[in-house]
Amino acid sequence: GNSVTQMEGPVTLSEEAFLTINCTYTATGYPSLFWYVQYPGEGLQLLLKATKADDKGSNKGFEATYRKETTSFHLEKGSVQVSDSAVYFCALSDRPGSARQLTFGSGTQLTVLP
Amino acid sequence: EAGVTQFPSHSVIEKGQTVTLRCDPISGHDNLYWYRRVMGKEIKFLLHFVKESKQDESGMPNNRFLAERTGGTYSTLKVQPAELEDSGVYFCASSQGSGGAYNEQFFGPGTRLTVL
């Protein structure tokens, strides 16, 4: 079956530090990959996505590249801000374009200190 | 436009009691999903409605869980009787009908269930 393995947290960084959160996956076929973010007291929000190999998703300064050869989708940001403190979830959908369930990783708690 | 809403935000019950969680999807969204995050682990799929029909309930853990979606609008998830291992955060999500492009799932804030 499908699975997502995500870097264990929590992660604590100083403002303006570089962020990497590792994510690898196991799936049949050609999944779509996602990063969701959950800010305190809110629901999960889609941060970025990539639907095929070598695609790069980007949003709010965050980036992730779909690497089929390493089955990875690592999240990066060059300079984090205090407002980026949240829980980040890597996820996949094995049939893009249809309303399929998402398979999530365990989440990584990020705290950015001023 | 209102997002996905869930009620209650928190629920604390004793083992053996019954709890009903409610989800109101975004208006016009045919697809409604329930997910659960237990003990800070991964978020796991429970089931998927298309309008009022259960499309996929492969993630439902056992027959103590019953989900309904009245008239294809809001949904309820009932746990009866609740057990300790049912504690966690229950998320609801909704999306538009299937089509060529990915239909983003919009999530509610979750209901935190604690079973004592």
Image (spheres, coloured by chain):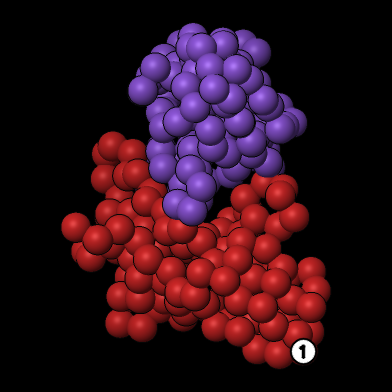
Question: Which residue is pictured at 47% across the width and 62% down the height?
Answer: B92
State the quadrant of the N terminus of chain B.
Answer: bottom left
* Observer-nearest of B78 and A3: B78
The amino acid sitting under disc 1 is: Gly
Residue A16 seen in this snapshot: yes
Residue A25 falls in image quadrant:
top right
Is residue B52 found left or right of A33 in the rendered image?
left
Q: Position of residue A45 (x, y in %)?
A: 41, 42
Q: Position of residue B73 (x, y in %)?
A: 30, 75
* Observer-nearest of A92 and A41: A41
Question: Which residue is pictured at 71% across the width and 32% down the height?
Answer: A10
Query: Which residue matches tag 1?
Result: B16
State the quadrant of the C terminus of chain B.
Answer: bottom right
Is residue A2 found left or right of A39 in the rendered image?
right
In the rendered picture, chain A carries what hue? purple
Question: Which residue is pictured at 51% across the width and 12% down the height?
Answer: A16
Q: Describe the element under mark 1 as helix, strand or loop.
A: loop
In the rendered picture, chain B carries what hue? red
Residue sticking out furthest to the bottom: B17
